[in-house]
Image (spheres, rainbow, N blue to C red):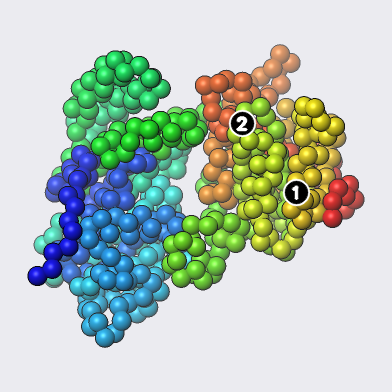
Amino acid sequence: MVVRDTKQLKLNKPQLLSLLARKSSSTSVWGRGTGKSSDIGNLIDGIVKTMPRSCWAIVGRTYQQLLTRTLPSTIAALERLGYYRGVHFFVGKSAPENWRWSLPYQSPLAFKHFIHFFNGTGFVLISQDGGGGSARGLNLDGAITDETLLLDKEKYDDEVSPTLRANKDRFGHLKIHRGHFHFTSMPHGDQGRWILDQGKYLLEKYDFITLTNEMLDLQLKFVDSRDKEYRLRLWRDILEIKKQIRFYPDKKGLYYSEANIFDNLENIPLAYLQEQRDVLTEFTFLTEVLNKRPGSVEAGFYPMLDTKRHTYDAYNNDYLNGLEFNLKKLSVVDSRMDGDCESALPLRIAVDWGTRISTLTIAQDLPKEYRFLKGMYVKRPKLIKDLAELFTTYYAYHLNKTVYFIQDNEWGNRRLPNSDVTFNEEFVRHLRAAGWRVLVVDLGRVASPQVRYQLAHALLSPDSSLKKVSFNRHNCKDVLTAMSLAPLRQNRKGEFEKDKSSERRESTPAEEATHFTDTVDLHFATIRNPITNSTPDFSDMVLISS
């Protein structure tokens, strides 16, 4: 008998409670570093052991998400449980025929998007963008979703839920049969509001939201303090509140829970938590690490922005499929993975130079659509060269090396210290050195804040007759966050303008301030419209490089 080296498996409290809960479905709203992937691994382990030859779905918004985020972390979690790829399961194909493994009772006919386990249990990788497998025609025993906040709920209900109808005679006695198991970080805005509604049954018993917010305030103070005695007092108060927060299934077996990185400090070093605090924006740290329910900005500068109407998902699934589940290659992200980037067409870019952060947005002007492809930024001490390298590296494989640079005359033409060139000129030099042909778009005098507000309102309006404006949901995440948080105020003349006080506040991370939004305004000014009564002539731009 061969005994392999064994390791003790430790579960944190949320994972243990999830494992022990007598649930038929679950919704786990857990922050970064909490152990979502391990919990998915625990669930798959339970399914394999108790439901051999069952067939489940693993659902994501996009195929790229499943391949680059869900799959690698899930495989790592399975390895910790003793399951090894190519030994206990295969990805993207069934086991070799001479291994004589069983298939699910109701198996898909193709295995390109399939995970096949040694005892015939299977999982179909389903994506809503069509790149992965499709739920149509399948008979499934249950569904697991990752980053559920990104899902199109109506599409999930229409396409996935009706397929959970298989093997009632074999597995109907098990509570998890035909269950929906959702794993997600905290949704914000209206996105994924239905997920938080899953926990309403808890509010009928006690106000766990108020308790959680009180605990999060203490946890934030804990992270920001370096005083050991103060931290010890905070820790005691955190534990007292935590004792009052309890999650349990409802009468139908739905188990809703929330957790954050503090629930996993036995496995995550405190230094990592402090590092995340330093490198992440305030909004991202609070929502994705501490798992705080975010508020919203009412009457903002972009009130017509609607993430459902103005955003899209677009990945080059043919390119992703060509990587054949090679996790190392999948970890290298560049524009070849983007399905919305027209490689034969030039790019348009706009930059906002700042003392704390410099931001860049990339777009393409199509006949019927102005498409924002991506947002990038560098923070102090990084500056011009670093931002240029981000751009040229990501778009190194873009075929058309022509870029229209929509320059900000107000700040971009400041001169660098001890230099005879401006910020804009230095940026162009770096692009040229990387082989790009740069055409400068000079907008002249910057439009007034009132005009910019009216222009944004008109371009984003649902009944607008102007060119459609759209944003890549994944690549423009920081841009969209900044736009949704940009406040509106009236100046002394009674005109509307953007409240840019966030740029001066050290307490507000630069990514969440209005820097990104100023680059969006520059793009908007180049779209033909009746408000500014002028559109730059792109046929006769100043040639800076070739």
Q: Position of residue 40 (x, y in %)?
A: 28, 53
In the displayed structure, does residue 296 sit left or right of residue 259? right
Is residue 133 positioned above or below 223 on the image? below
Quarter of the image for residue 337 reads bottom right
Residue pictured at 61% horizontal, 44% vertical: 375
| Tag 2: amino acid | Arg
Q: Residue furthest bottom?
A: 98
- Quadrant location, the C terminus: bottom right
Q: Quadrant of residue 424?
A: top right
Q: Which mark is residue 406?
A: none
Q: Note whether residue 177 is visible.
A: no
Q: Secondary structure at mark 2?
A: loop
Residue bearing mark 1? 431
- Amino acid carrying mark 1 in the image: Leu
Chain-order first, disc 1 or disc 2: 2
Q: Which residue is mark 2?
A: 380
